Amino acid sequence: MDVSKPLLIALVLIGGLLTMQTDTARADTELYRWKDQNGRLVHSDRPPPAGMEYETINVRAGKTEKRPNSTVSNRPPAGSSVKPGREELEVIKKNPKICENARNNVEVLRSAARIRLKSDDGGYKFLSDEQKAEQIRKAEDLISIHCE
């Protein structure tokens, strides 16, 4: 699989940050990359749910390798309509518009004391500090994927 250099650099940087937060002495840090049920690309230090096609990223060496589902227990039962993930993950193309929106979102989330959103019932609700932190994390993930 051909991975673009900017995407590989972003993945290595994400891996480096995760390594600093967890265990810097560990020599074989691995990240996992897969697509969830909604088609979104997921990066994690934990393996995906059973039956999902995924890739491992060796952060120290910057090496990516594809691993097929290898254990019998991960396979869906015979006759099941559950299908494993696609054979190959698509390389995400950088999108400057998403990049700009994500950067603006981070700026607003970090500068505003309270963020008010319109709820489904027509009223308004305020984001908690935890919700703001989660939105910042999501925006930073988008920045690492879509910004150069």
Image (cartoon, helix red, strand yellow):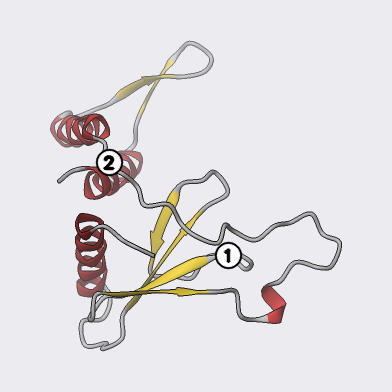
Q: Looking at the image, is mark 1 or mark 2 earlier in the sequence?
A: 1
Amino acid type for the residue under numbered disc 2: Ala
Instruction: Kindly identify which residue carries mark 1.
Output: 49
Establish if 117 lies above or below 72: above
Residue 139: numbered disc: 2
Q: Tell me how many marks there are.
A: 2
Answer with the quarter of the image where residue 115 lies: top left
Q: Residues within 10 Å of mark 1 (few under 14, many from 20)?
A: few
Q: Residue at x 52, y 18 (%)?
A: 120
Residue 9: numbered disc: none
Residue 36 x, y percent position in the rendering:
52, 52
Q: Residue at x 27, y 87 (%)?
A: 26
Establish if 42 lies above or below 99: below
Residue 16 x, y percent position in the rendering:
20, 70
Task: Give the SS element for disc 1.
Answer: loop
Find out whether the residues at labels 1 and 2 contact each other: C-beta distance under 8 Å. no
Amino acid type for the residue under numbered disc 1: Pro
Front-lying residue, 110 or 114: 110
Relative side of 134 to 79, left or right: left
Mark 1–mark 2 Cα distance, whole angstroms, equals 24 Å
Answer with the quarter of the image where residue 106 lies: top left
Task: Give the SS element for disc 2.
Answer: helix
Residue 6 x, y percent position in the rendering:
19, 55
Q: Quadrant of the N terminus?
A: bottom left
Front-lying residue, 119 or 107: 107
Establish if 8 lies above or below 31: above
Front-lying residue, 30 or 126: 30
Relative side of 5 to 49, left or right: left
Q: Residue at x 53, y 14 (%)?
A: 121
Q: Residues within 10 Å of mark 2 (few under 14, many from 20)?
A: many
